[in-house]
């Protein structure tokens, strides 16, 4: 790794630590969306909040070296962008995606 | 003289990663703005060499900000690169049709962002 790359990597690690509260907030928003949609498949406001959180995670996680996190968040965003109400299978899949996102983020913290 | 780039994005972390990347890897001077309105004001004040503009922002989104920049004589000729997390082909065409210099996607690679911008704008110094 050359000098610029080393400096960038170190400063990105600092930024990642600083960004964690915001990333956790977005994950919490996804969990809250899942909970709200479990109670009411047609909760448009919850769906919008979840879509926005997923969009932001999709944009940022890969930038921090977590492309898989961006893919998962993008899949959640795509599902929440559909106009059809989410069914139980969709919600199960969303729960699995959120758990996978948690694991991806935790793996970076451990690394 | 280092290139001067203005980043307009409402997301703090994206803005900071992009700035860090361009400053560290390419040695460019970076200014940041957190909204379309603040970005237009900075562009008028600083006349940067290029603007990296997020698409999805509250109040004034990227395409609206771009149109405002084009309508102002002092910012009309600054090349603008739209930055978006959306990857649908229809979106890409819609954004390209606006007349922006390029459309780039999030997530980006901080190691190659400056090179990608330089390539998109025909700069040979990154």
Image (tube, coloured by chain):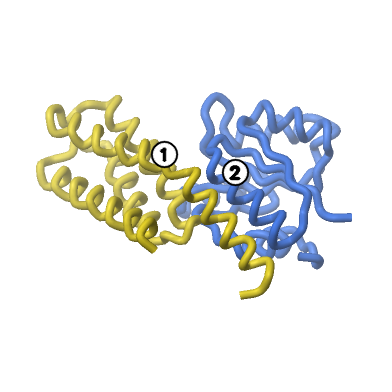
Q: Is residue A66 above or below residue A98?
A: below
Chain A hue? yellow
Q: Are marks 2 and 1 on the same chain?
A: no
- Residue B15, disc: 2
- Residue A21, disc: 1
Residue at image point 21% right, 37% down: A34
- Which image quarter is the N terminus of chain A in? bottom right
Image coordinates for residue A69, horizontal then vertical, percent = 36, 56
Image coordinates for residue B41, horizontal then vertical, percent = 75, 28
Q: Quadrant of residue A55?
A: top left
- Work out whether residue B83 or residue A8 is closer to the camera in this orientation and state it: A8
Farthest bottom residue in view: A1
Image coordinates for residue A77, horizontal then vertical, percent = 34, 44
Farthest right residue in view: B1
Farthest left residue in view: A88
Q: Residues within 10 Å of mark 2 (few under 14, many from 20)?
A: many
Disc 2: which chain? B
Whether residue A26 sits left or right of residue B104 in the image: it is: left
Discs 2/1, front: 1
Q: Is residue B28 above or below residue B69?
A: below
Chain B hue? blue
């Amino acid at each position: 790794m050359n000098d610029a790359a080393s400096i960038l990597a170190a400063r990105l690690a600092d930024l990642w630590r600083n960004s964690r509260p915001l990333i956790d907030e977005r994950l919490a928003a996804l969990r809250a969306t899942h909970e709200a949609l479990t109670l009411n498949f047609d909760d448009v406001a919850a769906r919008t909040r979840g879509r926005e959180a997923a969009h932001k995670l999709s944009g940022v996680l890969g930038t921090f070296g977590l492309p898989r996190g961006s893919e998962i968040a993008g899949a959640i965003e795509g599902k929440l962008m559909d106009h059809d109400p989410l069914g139980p299978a969709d919600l199960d899949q969303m729960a699995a995606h959120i758990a996978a996102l948690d694991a991806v983020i935790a793996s970076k913290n451990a690394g | 003289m280092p290139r001067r780039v203005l980043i307009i994005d409402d997301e703090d972390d994206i803005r900071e990663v992009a700035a860090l990347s361009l400053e560290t890897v390419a040695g460019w001077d970076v200014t940041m703005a957190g909204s379309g309105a603040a970005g237009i004001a900075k562009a008028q004040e600083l006349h940067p060499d290029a603007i990296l503009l997020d698409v999805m922002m509250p109040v004034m989104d990227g395409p609206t900000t771009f149109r405002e920049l084009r309508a102002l004589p002092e910012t009309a000729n600054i090349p603008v690169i739209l930055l978006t997390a959306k990857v649908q082909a229809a979106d890409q065409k819609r954004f390209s049709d606006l007349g922006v210099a390029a459309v780039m996607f999030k997530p980006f690679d901080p190691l190659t962002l400056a090179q990608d911008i330089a390539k998109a704008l025909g700069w040979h110094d990154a």
